[in-house]
Image: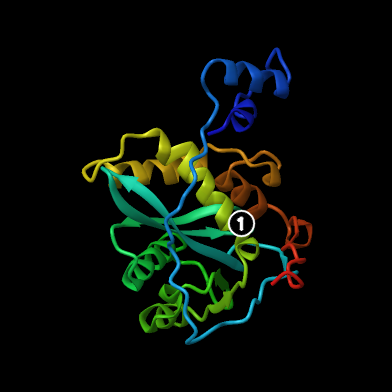
């Protein structure tokens, strides 16, 4: 994780403030290098488009809005692709599925992993939000979404999928990019990354709690006292 997140992890009070802590970390080689990605992971399509159902929506709990997207990752000098699914309310990473294919079947596998992460929970009326990639409108993927009584939503611009776009930047730059990824170790590292992200990384939007800790905290609150989150609205003119 980045130095700013690291500052909030220790339970004891640190002898320096956040900004000084970051400067010390940067000076000792802990500054992350962001790599530009030129690989296209979305196959545009004009067959079927779902409306954006989440813009300006007030989210009051988990399993109300999920976001999904695809990113590119080098593994042994080969192109691999990661499908991520995130619960917007708690920022929990429900699925990180890596493969060499951009085919729709990989999105189906990723979604099944997300269902497993939420096993036993009611997903009815949960909105699955994505871009307009053809992977998301495949028949198999749509049927799987509808099997849980979920609804599909799509964006016109990347900014309308910002929550999962941000998590993918974090995964690439703060986690996966720090390993010498191989075909043999990829599966094991992915499982570790999911655990590190959900159980160890504090989030400013979650009152510096981890996604797992935030879900446990909210679960113990009366429903009328649970934090609310309004999904940002403001790109309609641009799109």
Percent position of residue 103, x then y: 33, 70
Placement of the C terminus among the 4 image quadrants: bottom right
Q: Which residue lies furthest to the left in this view?
A: 184
Q: Which residue lies furthest to the bottom in this view?
A: 47
Identify the residue under disc 1: 163
Image quadrant in which you'd find residue 225: bottom right
Q: Residue at x 59, y 44 (%)?
A: 213
What is the secondary structure assignment of the residue under circle 1? helix
Q: Residue at x 25, y 41 (%)?
A: 182
Q: Which residue lies furthest to the top in this view?
A: 15
Image quadrant in which you'd find residue 185: top left
- 57 left or right of 195? right
Identify which residue, 8 or 107, lies in the foreground.
107
Percent position of residue 67, x then y: 55, 64
Q: Which residue is drawn at 32% across and 53% down?
A: 80
- 109 left or right of 76? right
- Above/below status of 80 relative to 172: below
Q: Which residue lies furthest to the front in this view?
A: 38
């Amino acid at each position: 994780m980045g130095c700013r997140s690291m500052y909030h992890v220790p339970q004891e009070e640190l002898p320096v403030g956040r900004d000084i802590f970051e400067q010390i970390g940067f000076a000792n080689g802990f500054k992350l290098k962001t790599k530009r990605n030129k690989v296209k992971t979305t196959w545009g399509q004009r067959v079927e488009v779902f409306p954006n159902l989440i813009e300006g929506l007030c989210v009051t709990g988990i399993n109300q809005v999920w976001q999904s997207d695809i990113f590119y990752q080098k593994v042994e000098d080969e192109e691999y692709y990661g499908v991520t699914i995130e619960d917007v309310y708690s920022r929990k990473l429900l699925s990180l599925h890596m493969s060499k294919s951009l085919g729709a079947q990989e999105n189906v596998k990723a979604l099944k992993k997300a269902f497993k992460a939420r096993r036993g929970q009611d997903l009815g009326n949960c909105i699955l939000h994505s871009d307009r990639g053809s992977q998301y409108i495949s028949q198999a993927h749509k049927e799987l979404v509808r099997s849980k009584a979920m609804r599909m939503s799509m964006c016109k611009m990347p900014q309308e999928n910002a929550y999962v776009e941000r998590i993918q930047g974090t995964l690439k730059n703060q986690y996966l990019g720090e390993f010498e990824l191989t075909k043999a170790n990829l599966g094991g590292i992915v499982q570790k990354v999911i655990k590190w992200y959900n159980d160890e990384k504090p989030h400013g939007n979650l009152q510096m709690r981890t996604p797992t800790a935030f879900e446990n905290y909210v679960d113990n609150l009366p429903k009328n006292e649970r934090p609310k989150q309004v999904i940002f609205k403001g790109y309609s003119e641009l799109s």
